[in-house]
Image (cartoon, helix red, strand yellow):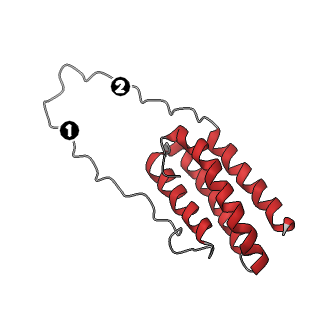
Amino acid sequence: MIRFARPLIIASAVLVLAACQKQPEPAKPATTPAPATAPATPPPAAAPATPPPTTTAAVDSVGVPECDNYITKYMACVSGKVPEASRAQLQASLDQMRTAWKQAAATDAGKASLAQACTAANDAAKSSMSAFGCTDF
């Protein structure tokens, strides 16, 4: 059982550390004043906002309720509150963790250790994801 828990704890720690890293804010585009002789035309219509890409979190279940609950909460936080610059890194970390959890869940012993590991990951996310304003953990 320890054999399955150690990689999961390490993966959880990596995910927590990645979430805690402060990302620099993107530079704001410089604005240039319009020429004095520019004709008064209305600005072009803004393109409609595209929804964030759908994730496979809901469909790609680990099979352990504690883990599936953690993934759902984490994805809601990442897609709704994490700055765009940090999202890809956090999503990649979560995808790696989900893959490892699914492999561990292939055995009964793995499922038992995953329940504990995912509960610990959820507890760790309470503090690390609160930096982004996520309080659902």
Could you tell whether 38 is left or right of 67 in the image? left
Badge 2 crowding class, 10 Å Cα cut-off, few under 14, some 14 to 19, many 20 or more, is few
Residue sitting at 65 percent across and 66 percent down? 98
Q: Quadrant of residue 22?
A: top right
Residue sitting at 51 percent across and 41 percent down? 132
Name the residue nearer the viewer: 11 or 135: 135
Would residue 89 be visible to someone looking at this image? no
Image spot of residue 95 (x, y percent): 63, 62
Could you tell whether 50 is left or right of 86 in the image? left
Judging from the image, what secondary structure is the residue with disc 1 in? loop
Image spot of residue 74 (x, y percent): 54, 56
Q: Quadrant of the N terminus?
A: bottom right
Residue sitting at 47 percent across and 56 percent down? 76
Number of numbered markers? 2
Could you tell whether 48 is left or right of 52 in the image? left
Q: Furthest-left residue in view? A: 40
Residue at label 2? Answer: 31
Q: Quote the CA–CA distance across marks 1 and 2.
A: 15 Å
Q: Amino acid at mark 2?
A: Thr
Residue at label 1? Answer: 43
Q: Furthest-top residue in view? A: 36
Name the residue nearer the viewer: 123 or 105: 123
Q: Note whether 11 is above or below 112 in the view shown.
A: above
Mark carried by residue 104? none
Name the residue nearer the viewer: 19 or 28: 19
Q: Amino acid at mark 1?
A: Pro
